[in-house]
Amino acid sequence: MTVSVTDLQYVALAVPDLAAERAFFGEKWGLVEVAEQDGSVYFAAEGMPHPYVLVLREDAERKTDLVGFSAASREDVLALFEQVKAAGAKIISEPAPATGPAGGFAFRFFDPDGRAMEVICDSTPRAFRKLDKGEAIPIGISHVVFHSPNHKGLAEFYEKALGFRLSDWIGDFMVFLRCNSAHHRLAILPGPPALNHIAFDVSSVDEMMRGLARMHENGITLSWGPGRHTAGNNTFSYFITPNGNAVEYTSDLDEVDEDTWQPQTYQPGPNTIDQWGTGRIITGNVPHAEMTPDKGLWQVPA
């Protein structure tokens, strides 16, 4: 039986202006700075036990360093390592004690496009809390969206290697994959190998709108939204960080019943991508920037 990772745990980014990105995520976006180690700054989310959900470091070029997924146990880490090898991935490091500030047991590999990935278990969980009504900060990390020159092949890789399951398609160009009850922790689009955006869950559409207002008050321009997607049924508002990373506030993402869920293929179109239509009528909205290959591909992370 295929073993599955249990969650998306973190994304690690390199940015030219660390101070600006650090201030954005800590002072405006609503994450909590929890550690600094070897030049990297670690951020957690108030409503999630993951020890960190975002890692930042300074580099001459903006790039994605690493994407981390949780596993349930050391036994699962070892089983996932064998699955990743069997799927043909290039291994960066074999299962061993993890190097981050929360410890753990992990291995790393490159996916077929050259993204560095980590599978980790037994890291020290963080004390977390239930957010108050109206508290418009992230509960936790929600999902990532990748571009790939072979998006169908990449989806099959994640199904075989990490145990992801198909939730839905939009046409034949966007696939949504899950590793737990959340409708998607990963989605993949065609294009040069790159990270499209990182999404963070907020408590409801009300908190999403309050967060949007706070971004506006802090001079952060809305990139796309507010609106509601169809696949996953989640609300969205997208913004661009000071270093050009796309981030999303999202809420109300569908929960999947593994025993009854039937994947759907939605017809592509404006009403599928934005069922409210609001994201199309607000001046300045740019749904997806033109992507270029990530500068971090095939680079072994520190």
Image (cartoon, rainbow, N blue to C red):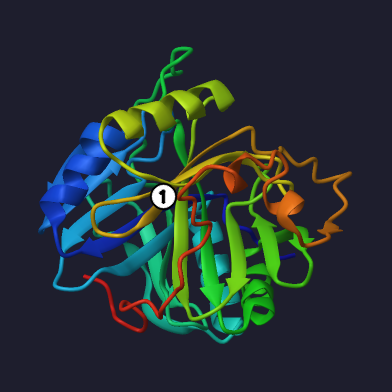
Near-viewer residue (50 or 80): 50
Q: Is residue 204 visible?
A: no
Locate residue 261 relative to residue 16 in the image: left or right: right
Residue at 45% over, 15% down:
134
Quadrant occupied by the N terminus: bottom right
Residue at 18% over, 46% down:
22
Instruction: Give coordinates of residue 120: x percent, y percent.
Output: 42, 57
Residue at 49% over, 27% down:
209
Classify 224 as above or below 202.
below
Near-viewer residue (276 or 266): 276
Near-viewer residue (227 or 203): 227
Q: Quadrant of residue 64?
A: bottom left
Locate residue 44 relative to residue 261 in the image: left or right: left
Quadrant occupied by the C terminus: bottom left
Classify 179 as above or below 149.
above
Q: Quadrant of residue 170?
A: bottom right
Instruction: Give coordinates of residue 65: x percent, y percent.
Output: 31, 68
Given the image, on which type of amino acid does mark 1 rest?
A: Val
- As helix, strand or loop, the secondary structure at mark 1 comes to strand
Q: Quadrant of residue 140?
A: top left
Locate residue 296 relative to residue 14 in the image: left or right: right
Q: How many marks?
A: 1
Locate residue 29 relative to residue 274 in the image: left or right: left
Q: Is residue 275 visible?
A: yes
Instruction: Give coordinates of residue 137: x percent, y percent.
Output: 39, 28
The residue singled out by tag 1 in the image is 247
Neighbour class for label 1 at 10 Å: few (<14), some, many (≥20)?
some
Residue at 64% over, 51% down:
184
Near-viewer residue (195 or 301): 195
Instruction: Give coordinates of residue 220: x percent, y percent.
Output: 30, 41
